[in-house]
Image: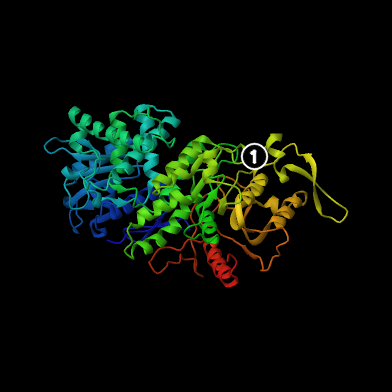
Amino acid sequence: MAETGSIVSEEGKIKCIITGKLRKETPEEYVRQEFCRVLLNVYKYPKEHIDIEFSIKVGREPKRIDIAIFNSEIKSQDNVYIAVETKKKKEEEGREQLQSYVNATTANFGVWTNGEQIVYVQKIMGVPNKLQDLPDIPKYGQSVDVIGKYKKSDLVAATDLKSIFTRCNNYFYTNQGLTQDKRFAEILKVLFCKIEDEKNYSEEDCEFYITPLEKESITGLKRFRDRITSLFERVKKRYETDNIFDKRDEIILNDRCLSFAVAEFQKYSMLETDADIKGVAFETFVGDNLRGEHGEFFTPREVVRMAAQMVMPKIGETVCDPACGSGGFLVMILKKMTPKFQEIASKKTRMSSDALLREYADKYIRGIDFNPDLARVAKMNMVLNDDGHTGIFHRDSLIPFEEWDETLLEKIRPDSIDIVLTNPPFGKKCVIDDKKILRNFDLGHRWEKNESGKWVMTDQVEHARTPDILFIERCLDLLRPHGRMAIVLPDGILGNDHLGFVRQYILQRALLVAIIDCPVETFLPTVDTKTSVLVLKKKEDMSEPQTFDVFMAVAKTCGHDRRGKKTYVRDTDGGIVYDVQNKPKVDNDLDTIAKRFLEYARSKNIYD
């Protein structure tokens, strides 16, 4: 069955995944359409077995089931198999509505969700007005007894991890009262248990699961917890030297919360889920928990993807992000390199493409972040995307190189990195005022114009600098001669008169390859700073001339509006344009610009 794509909205309407009709755009409709997508892609129910706003009689009153799933293509009140309620915002009201649907129809199962919470129930035969909670509903063609008893080959890629993270987060708060930081930590523990199970390639049967019978008995819950605890012990052992988990860490979730979280993740394959879906979900979740007020926000995926394409990474090249945050740029490089290793593996090499990618990631992917929580999360993000976590460090990238410890210098040395990709922290709230750091940077000194209008560095150290300026110099220090970098910078650095010395410094040390002017919406709704992406190639010596034209482009769209809502390409009549796979085309100039740049760079041999 083909996978159903994105939920599409246009001019206040949402195109229904089931019927193809336009429906009024509301938060509730988004929830309904997302669950329809899950029914099709994850549970594999045929579209012909599903209806929207299906009318039934409850007593003498007509009611409409938000989503009705039938036993066959016959859509009648006496053929309903599952009833789904998505309009009631509160659980108690949702359960009451499900009860009325189940009583009035032949439905064996019910689901209530508001997008942030979810409940699965089963009708208890012979007991009127009584519903029994389940960890999940059956997939198409399966019985309730099969829930949780999955083989690894049964697992499917997730299409919406963000909602799963949100539901777990809310459930932990409601049912155990955990603080935000503890909820965050527990979800990551559960997630790593899931990945650990999937990485046990010698066993086809999953260990990460919960069945309805286990959930309903004390002995079953003990057996379930022992199984998950054993997985977590293996997780800690696997990463005991990597500062991901402490050996004293334990899963503190109560049985109810742990079984809910496992049920939410158990039908999915984290390893098979698309890197973009994992990345967006992971970084959104991390951002909600860790984002501070000092520039600690995350680079939009559209910018990350464009930058990763424009540096044209090759096998055997070291890639570094010295302000890596949660590792978005590094994960994107892994995604870009995956097809290359799949091609190599297809030629009957001794290793699978996954093994080749892991070997590459461990040897060539590097990241540093000053925030210990973000550095730890970056390691986790790399593991989630099939590794490279050993190259991630919690350090201060801006301290003098002579103070870098040997462990770090073994992986990252000045003049040794082939590619730098980074979005350093910027903004007036985060400044570097440590004189010991500033005096080690040319850009940490005061610069003055001489009589000829050229900027000249003085011996006087500035009182403070924003870190983005210092990171420009640090990135160039890390690059080998003719190494290349893409860096996201606020437009002030590229345009303000008093920062002309920064631009002069860049042109002294690097060849200017490209400047991409990003839309004002790029970082919204989080940050309203206007930015550009600068692509540079480090000079071998200061006298090296620029022998090619600078590639310049202005992106008017970035795939989302000021509220973060996706935007689509439209035809002359205002209708959404679809690609050859019948998926709506996201209105994103950055992808188009990246393709144009690749043609330009190859024609000019820019990186050769």
Residue 101 shows up from this direction: no
Q: Tell me which residue sits at (21%, 39%) in the image.
A: 211
Between 9 and 445, the residue placed more toward the observer is: 445
Residue 581 shows up from this direction: yes
Q: Tell me which residue sits at (50%, 39%) in the image.
A: 375
Disc 1 element: loop
Which residue is at the far bottom?
603
Between 134 and 439, the residue placed more toward the observer is: 439
Q: Amino acid at mark 1?
A: Pro
- Asked if 558 appears above or below 281 in the picture, the reply is below
Q: Quadrant of residue 409?
A: top right
Between 341 and 219, the residue placed more toward the observer is: 341
Which residue is at the far right?
451
Give coordinates of residue 396: x percent, y percent. 58, 38
Residue at the spot of label 1 = 400
Quick check: 247 left or right of 213? right
Q: Tell me which residue sits at (21%, 32%) in the image.
A: 223
- Asked if 74 appears above or below 225 in the picture, the reply is below
